[in-house]
Amino acid sequence: MSTGLPQVLLVKYHDTNIRPIPDHAERTLQLFPSLGILYLAGVLREEGFPVEVLDANAENLSAQEFHQRVRDSKARIVGFTSMTAGWPSTIEGAGIARKALPEALVVVGGPQLSIHPELCLSFPQLDLGVCGDGEETLLEVARAVAGGTSLEEIPGTVVKIDGEIRKNPDRTWHRDIDRYPFPAVELLDWSLYRALTVQTPFYTMVTTRGCPFKCRFCSQIYAGNTVRFRSPENVVDEIELYVRKYGAREIVFFDETFTLNKARVMKICRLIRERSLVFRFDMRTRVDSLDEEMVLALREAGGQRVHFGIESGSQEILDRMGKQTTVDQVRTAVSLCKRHGFSTRGYFMIGYLGETPQTYAETLKVARELDLDWASFSITTPLPQTHLFDEARSLGLVDEGFWRDYTLLKSPRLQFPIIESEYWDEARLQKMLKRAYSSFYLRPRMVWRHLTGLHGWEGLRDLAGGVRVMLSLQR
């Protein structure tokens, strides 16, 4: 039955593949849904708006197929989410949506909008931008469309008025994020999503928003260097929904640092046990945000895998990054989690400002010595509005106007900037990246560990996927 309210279509369009790993290999490693648009869908639906979610990336839709799906939706509002990496693809998708539904309001939100709001909205296929938390803002936009009222002065938006682009005042964030309904996960086909070593069916969650730390390579314009917590009860209510109703075997927590507040973590673990919820979960944290009591509680509650943002094995580089961690803390945290049965994953950056052959060698040495189960290496990207970008720009190592040109799709090539030095150029950095992966994964100990750790079809599938990724990196 029609509600008389405008149909809303929320879209995750294709990602822009700018990584060293080819697109097909990246999809083998992992493919996750956008929790952001699922949260928006939940809020809109709670207010009675008919909502559809379309993940063109997960469905691997062609441009023609996407055009038809958008047209068939008959939506009056089409909303896109965009990370910086996916911005060129988002503009492509918005152009298709504009042709499919010429009268629809085409809206875009996500972190990219908070970086260059006016530039983002300069494209003719976009009508309105949403900056920061989108729940209240998009709901107010939808109400305005439903009522035929003005869109010009809604807080948290960027609008076009008589051909001019204007950014309205920011919307005040709510500290209480329990107020939001759970993501509308039932609007997606979760069989489309996957990740190596993650059991299916699985679901993804965030229990916090933001991060209080100030690593120099990380842009916190979207979160404001603050962190907001959901209550333990609210978190476990969502877990219970996925486990009881949807049969989740595993939940992947995407908090920047899941273990920030020890008392909160301990209560979440206690509530999981009290409700007899049986599932596995993996989480992301820092090496200085764990202790043995917490690790034991997490393991008893179903914790399976810990992802550490280690970044470097060189104390000199860690200090330059502003990580406020030490190599000794890295060793202690990984050892603690391994000792209590956790699978461990480490993430490392190479080519940071000030990196030398010596610091690079230290990172590879530490990565091999930590006894991690998995490691991921990436070439450092000086992201917009970070201390790293400002420092590299002041030294003449990156083009001051790169991110402006990138946002306007005027960049000479679809590739993020890197930091070249007296020791390497881009080609050399790519070779260093390949060497990092080879030196970690092609050791007899690692090969034997993954062969002997196979469990059934899922284990064999994960191993085959990992081999394909390794082969793609060596090309």
Image (cartoon, rainbow, N blue to C red):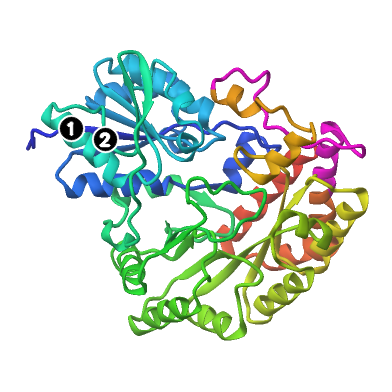
Q: Residue at x 44, y 44 (%)?
A: 192
Q: Quadrant of the C terminus?
A: top right
SS of the residue under disc 2: loop
Q: CA distance from mark 1 to mark 2?
A: 9 Å
Q: Quadrant of the N terminus?
A: top left
Give the quarter of the image for residue 235. bottom left
Q: Which residue is mark 2?
A: 154
The earlier-in-sequence mark between 1 and 2 is 1
Residue 349 numbered tag:
none
Which residue occupies the foreground of this view, 2 or 456? 2
Amino acid type, callout 1? Ala
SS of the residue under disc 1: helix
Residue 85: x and y in percent read 57, 35
Q: Which residues are magenta?
A: 408-435
Is 211 above or below relative to 290?
above
Q: Are marks 1 and 2 in contact (CB under 8 Å)?
A: yes
Which residue occupies the foreground of this view, 133 or 187? 133
Q: Residue at x 46, y 64 (%)?
A: 250
- Residue 219 included in the magenta stretch of the image: no
Question: Does any portion of residue 62 appear in the rendered image?
Answer: no
- Residue 420 included in the magenta stretch of the image: yes
Q: Which residue is mark 1?
A: 144
Residue 290: x and y in percent read 60, 76
Is 48 above or below relative to 179?
above
Q: Residues within 10 Å of mark 2 (few under 14, many from 20)?
A: many
Amino acid type, callout 2? Ile
Residue 363: x and y in percent read 83, 58
* Chief secondary structure of the magenta portion: loop
Q: Is residue 53 left or right of residue 359?
A: left
